[in-house]
Image (cartoon, rainbow, N blue to C red):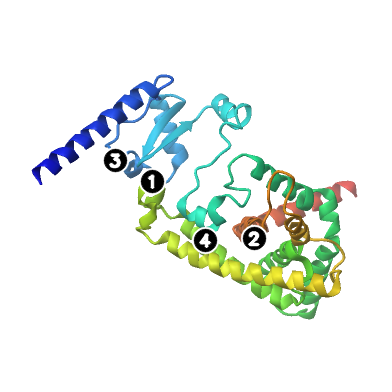
Amino acid sequence: MASFLVYAAACLLAALWYAAWFRRHSRRGPPLPRPNWPPLVGSIPFLEPDLHSYFARLARAHGPIFSLRLGAKLAVVVTSPSLAREVLKDQDAAFANRDVPAAARVIAYGGEAEIVWNPNGPVWRMLRRACVREMLCPAGLDAVYDLRRREVRAAVRSLRARAGSSVDVGAEMFLTVMNVITSTLWGGTLEDREERSAVGKEFQELVAEITELLGRPNVSDFFPALARFDLQGIQRQMHILLERFDRIFESIIERRKRRLEEGGRKMHGGDDFLDHMLRLEAAGGDDRTPFTMTNVKALLMVSVLSFYSFDLRCFVFYVFSVYIILHNQTNNNI
């Protein structure tokens, strides 16, 4: 037993010596200035809610660029416009990759199937090209014009049917834009407006839970060696939400594929985002990068999260601002 303890102590000392030697000889320049916080936890206990004010105060003490130790992670903070330009524009390719949080890795199908957390490379470029070419280009938006018009007209008919009664305008506007977005994503797959609204409301509830989990501090993010234990249960809860999303996506995709097999053409006028993604999936991607059904669901997930996490108050304020601008322009023209 004594010999085993001596052997273990010798191995530990050797590992610590090698780590110190490696850190000393692997540095390519002087270390960045940093606050002197206790080991192991680093700056985590001292972070403040208003990070911009906290970082500005540290910048006055340590300069425009400094480092923070967040558990086992090293973070570098830049606070000057010239350094921000260097990082975000001049050297953007070198800083393009992101450290995927443990909860985000679960909901993003591993972080390598969609466009947000995917590292910069052939897969990310292929996904970006597919989104820009098929969904965000003028031709892609024109292709789903009939879908957008259908939803707006349905909203007008709904309001007309309730003439003389009180109406929550903000909720109606949010519901209309929600239906426009989902129609742009998967078109006429859900023909019934009430069914689309029910699916949209379920998405809204799921996104609220996902956003809460993503914003919750997670020990696994600061100490990756503990991620496998999921001490706070955040990954387990995210897996449950992912399964609920998966059931909805798979139902929508199967109904679309069945309709295409039976009738050939869709009931709506143009191709939507799901049509393009299924076509790309059937082709297997491009010459260099495969494209699978996981990529289809991951891109749908990103699209849904990006809209449903948008705050309703911001949306109403935006629409009201547009109304004021258009109203002023009309008066000026008159």
Q: Amino acid at mark 4?
A: Ile
- Above or below, 250 against 223 in this view is below
Earlier sequence position, callout 3 versus callout 2: 3
Picture coordinates of residue 168 (x, y %)? Answer: 67, 71
Earlier sequence position, callout 4 versus callout 1: 4
Earlier sequence position, callout 3 versus callout 4: 3
Q: Secondary structure at mark 1?
A: helix
Q: Amino acid at mark 3?
A: Leu
Q: Residue at x 39, y 24 (%)?
A: 26
Instruction: Give whichever of 263, 274 is nearer the camera.
Output: 263
**In this picture, residue 107 sits left or right of residue 169:** left
Picture coordinates of residue 35 (x, y %)? Answer: 34, 31
Q: Residues within 10 Å of mark 3 (few under 14, many from 20)?
A: few
Q: Residues within 10 Å of mark 4 (few under 14, many from 20)?
A: many
- Above or below, 22 against 300 in this view is above
Query: Which residue does the numbered mark 3 point to in the structure image?
Result: 40
Q: Residue at x 57, y 24 (%)?
A: 82
**Of labels 3 and 2, the one closer to you:** 2
Instruction: Give whichever of 213, 293 is nearer the camera.
Output: 293
Instruction: Give whichever of 162, 145 is nearer the camera.
Output: 145
Query: Which residue does the numbered mark 4 point to in the structure image?
Result: 210
Measure the alpha-carbon separation of dots 1 and 2: 29 Å
Q: Secondary structure at mark 3?
A: loop
Query: Which residue does the numbered mark 2 point to in the structure image?
Result: 297
Q: Amino acid at mark 1?
A: Phe
Query: Which residue does the numbered mark 1 point to in the structure image?
Result: 222
